[in-house]
Image (tube, rainbow, N blue to C red):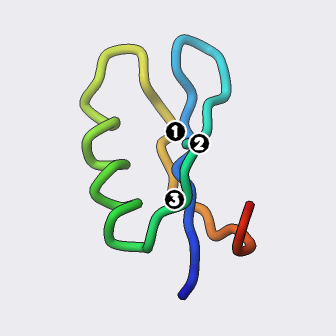
Amino acid sequence: MKNFKVRWVEDGRERASVVAYDESSAKRRADELEPQEGVSNVRVVPVAPGA
């Protein structure tokens, strides 16, 4: 299984999800983050297993 994390910028600070997701769950989480005020540059990135 491929693993993914969500990265975004919130109030000028780079953030990353603590957990690794499967691709569809990562996209769903990114969709939840995008409309939040102060959040920008939301992206789903592949990560190595266990990262």
Q: Position of residue 16 (x, y in %)?
A: 61, 39
Q: Is residue 3 above or below residue 20?
A: below
Determine the CA span between mark 1 and mark 2: 17 Å
**Total tally of numbered discs in the picture:** 3
Q: What residue sits 55% from the left and 42% below the top?
A: 17
Q: Residues within 10 Å of mark 2 (few under 14, many from 20)?
A: few
Which amino acid type is shown beneath numbered disc 1? Asn
Q: Quadrant of residue 8?
A: top right
> Residue 33 or 19: which is nearer the viewer?
19
What residue does disc 2 label?
18
State whether residue 20 is above or below residue 41. below
Q: As displayed, is residue 48 above or below residue 27?
A: below
Helix, strand or loop at disc 2?
A: loop
Numbered label attached to residue 44: 3
Disc 1 and disc 2 in contact, CB within 8 angstroms: no
At horizontal 43% and vertical 24% (from top left) the residue drawn is 39
**Secondary structure type for disc 1:** strand
Q: Which residue extends farthest bottom? A: 1
Looking at numbered disc 2 in the image, what kind of residue is underneath it? Val
Where is residue 4 shown, x and y percent of the image?
56, 66
Q: Nearer the viewer, mark 1 or mark 2?
A: 2
- Tell me the number on the disc at residue 41: 1
User: On the rendered structure, is 28 left or right of 44?
Assistant: left
> In this image, 5 relative to 25: left or right?
right
Residue at 52% from the left image edge and 20% from the top image edge: 10
Label 1 environment density (alpha carbons within 10 Å; few <14, some 14–19, many ≥20): few
Residue drawn at (27%, 48%) of the image: 31
- Identity, as a three-letter code, of the amino acid under mark 3: Val
- Looking at the image, tell me whether mark 2 or mark 3 is earlier in sequence order: 2
